[in-house]
Every structure is written in structure tokens, then in C-alpha cells.
Image: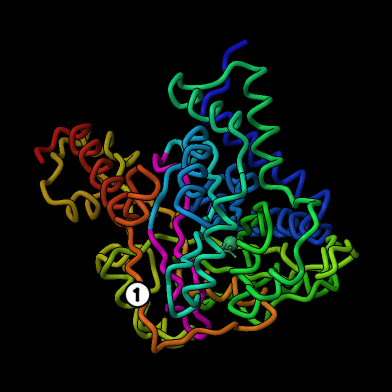
Amino acid sequence: MAPSTSTDLRAAFARRLSDMYGGEVPAYTTLVEVAHEVNGEVLEREGSAAERLGSIDRVTAERHGAIRVGSPTELEQVGRIFAAMGMHPVGCYDLRDAEPAPLPVVSTAFRPVDPAELARNPFRVFTSVLVPEDRRFFAADLQRRVQRFLAARTLFPPELLELADRAVAEGGLADDDAARFLDLATAAFALSPEPIDQFWYDELARVSGVAADIAGVTSTHVNHLTPRVLDIDLLYRRMQDRGVEMIDEIQGPPRWPGPDVLLRQTSFRALAEPRPMRSASGAVVPGELRVRFGEVEARGIALTPAGRDVVDALPPDAAAWAAALPSTEAGLADAGLAWFSASVAPAADDLRQAGERPPASPSALVDAGWVRLDPVVYEDFLPRSAAGIFRSNLADDGSRDAAEAGVERDGAWLAGALGREVHDPMDLYAGQVERSWAAARSALGVAS
Ligand code: OOG
Ligand code: NI
């Protein structure tokens, strides 16, 4: 048997997590069902236009998950596990200043970075790491106790990390090892049956529900798994019809007359799940926590830095968007507001046969029909929406003392903790577009 490649491992892991989550969080299964139903209807309604931002196969399999860890060491281990699946850290999202509710974490997303790999399976995991050094959230004494607690736990068994390192070194894993790797990786992100120290959990929950979720327990878990849908407004109504209460709004851009851009997301609140609690007396008693929820997303076209400057300043209001942005792909491309990849247009042959010569400038190549432009899908996250998703699932906003000093946490810090490069999302989009133009020009014989 051929060994499992990083692509195989990623696709299998996404399926395994989805099966596990569906078995344990019934509303997730409803969400996936409704997403499939809506995607089928959009495909019927719009035909091939529905696949403009990804094939229906990709969209149907597409999921993102989210996990939270406590320390740089744990983050480094997560990085090794995802590297085995061809998932690399992209972006830095500092949520400590998020409005209206700051969170004591900094985050990145692990995902494939190569367009061909994204097309094969785009599984991504939004990963947050606690910042107990941030004095605005944690007093010095609490910081020390958090760090001691984290240093004493093992999230990932050594065998899992060894298999992960081997998969990277050898470019894949043989069958038995692949099966073992997937078992261990799935188990590492399942909800643990270990009793939770009630007093410790509550102490952290007073600082932040996220701090308690991360450092109040001895394990980590996937806290949501998100299918992709082609019409999120329709899905929202359908979920409500089925009696699943969604959060009040869809996060991110509004529905507007132009093409889908960036990312729109909505979620439903976690259901209470039974968890054993250890009380102050040492007795283990039944308790419950709401830590696993559901989310769904619609992905649109990636915006350039210029495009982000425009929309990040806009309210989520259709009229404001329509006034500030061109409402067609061509308009967005002309204005340099969104990313489009270039390829040789089918008509190029006819033009050549008719004795035409391709012009030099990119816009002339597009206008004269030599080159076609296709939208680049936004593969990343939005900090404001991420904070909103976190918040929609917390009992309260916790507390932060703005008079205290924070600590620096940026992409360079994440890269240092991970021991690997953290990609800049904009560099990835720009590189992909540049390579597409170079290939198209070279195929047409136009000098760059
Ligand atoms: C992560 C929330 C962010 C998204 O889709 O923006 C996120 C978390 O709750 O741990 O997943
Ligand atoms: Ni999410």
C-alpha cells in the first residue's frame, strides 16, 4: 500500500473529527445537513456560477475547527502535529484588544498554503494560545499558578509527536502508522472525561471564560467545527425553522448587491454537556459546561490591502457597502480592491488564429480577451468576527484592568514559539496572483 501523504492525513483527520463531533454534538449534524441542503439548492439555482469560489466537492468537504492551548510549548507541539497534515501557521490575530470584549489570547490559523493543496482539502484550524503574562488579565500570583498548572499537563502523547515528526521527515506515514497517528490526533482533541477542579475552574472563569476553558482543565478539545455554505442567509433562516437558536447576527460583511467577499460567519450557542467536577471537599459530583458549539461560514473573494482599508472602515450595512465599492468582480479587479488570478483565456487561440498579437499590459490582456481572471478565495479569518464568535459562547465578558501593562505578542512571537515561519496572508495572496500572471504571460509569449 502507498503511504499516506500529508494531504491524505489532513483529509482523513478532518473526516475523523467531523464524525467524532457529529456523534457527540447533535446540533452540529443538523448544521451539516442544512448546509448540504442549502448548497444543493444554490447549485440548482445558479448552476456553474455557484462553483465560482470553489468546486462543490471542495465546499462540501470544507471544514474549519478551533482549538485553544495554554503555553508556547503546547503551541509548538500543535505546530508539529499540523505540519504532518500539510497545515502551516498563517496570520496573527491578537484578540486582547477585541471590541467589545477583550480576550486573553493571541491566535493563528493552521492551513494549507498552496492553492492546489487547498483545492484538495482546505481543512484549517483556528488556534489560540493563552497569554497569562498579560497583567491586564492575570495578577502575578495567578499567572504563576496558571503556568505551573500548564507545565504539569500533557496534551499530546509523545507517540503522537514522534509520528508527526516522522510524517514530516519521511513525507508521509505507512498504513499502520497513519491509522495510529489519526487515532491519537483525534483523541487529543476530544472532550476529556477527567474530573474538573471546580474551584480552580471558577477562579479562572472570573478572569475570562476562555482562560477557564484553556487552563482550567487538563486537556484541550475542538470547540467548534464549521462547515461552509454557499448562502448563509438562507441557512440562518433554515436553522431557525428547525428550532436551533442562532446568535443574533451574521458576523462580517453584510449581504450586499456585489459579489461575496471575505468571510461571513454565524454560530449557535454551545449546549450544556455533563462534565464531572471535583468540589473543594474532593468529592466528584456531576456538573455541566457549555464549551462546544457550532458555526457555519460563507467564504468570498480575498481583498487586497487597499480593499481591506475600504471595507474595514465600513459599517456592516448593505447601502454603505454599495456606495463604497464597485459591485462587480471586474469593478473590484479594476480598482485593485480584490485578488484575482490570471490564466490564458479559451479565446486566446482564436485571437491568435485571427492574426492578433497579445498586448503587453495586464489590463489590455484582460480587456482584449487573452487572459481571464478568476477570484481568489479568502482562506483566512477576521479578528472582529473571531472575537464575536468567542463572545457569543461565553457566559460573560470577564474582566480586564486596562491600567495594567500588556505584553507584546505578534507574528514574530508566534514564529518564535512555534519554531517555524508564520505566513502573512497578504503575501500568500500576492504570491499566488503574481505566479498566475507569470505563467499566463509565459504561455502567451508576452515578456514580463
Ligand atoms: C475561536 C473563534 C474564532 C472563527 O471562525 O473566527 C473562529 C475560538 O472560539 O476558539 O473560529
Ligand atoms: Ni470558527
Q: Where's residue 224, x and y in %?
A: 67, 59
The reply to whether residue 407 is in sight is yes
Q: Looking at this view, is 138 or 227 the one in front?
A: 138
Q: Is residue 109 magenta?
A: yes
The residue type indicated by label 1 comes to: Pro
Residue at screen point 46% across, 61% down: 107
The quarter of the image that holds ligand 2 is bottom right
Q: Quadrant of residue 440?
A: top left
Residue located farthest toward the top when viewing the structure as drawn = 1
Magenta-span inclusion, residue 287: no
Q: Is residue 44 visible?
A: no
**Of 380 and 365, the residue lying toward us:** 380
Residue at 35% x, 55% y: name it.
425
Compared to residue 397, the image places residue 440 above or below, namely above
Q: Is residue 235 left or right of residue 77?
A: right
Which quadrant holds the N terminus?
top right
Residue 432 location, quadrant: top left
Q: How is the image coloured?
A: rainbow
Instruction: Give coordinates of residue 408: x percent, y percent.
Output: 32, 68
Q: Nearer the viewer, residue 438 or 351?
A: 438
The structure residue drawn at horizontal position 43% and vertical position 57%, both measured from the top left corner, is 378
Q: Tell me which segment is drawn in magenta.
A: 92-115
In the displayed structure, would residue 110 be above or below residue 91? above
Is the C terminus in the top left, top right, bottom left or bottom right quadrant?
top left
Residue 406, percent from left and from top: 37, 76
Tally the marks.
1
Q: Position of residue 337 (x, y in %)?
A: 29, 67
* Above or below 341: residue 92: below
* Residue at 80% from the left image edge and 57% from the top image edge: 195
**Horizontal arrangement in the rendering, residue 88 relative to residue 43 (left or right):** left
Location of mark 1 (residue): 326
| Residue closest to the eye, 97 or 85 | 97
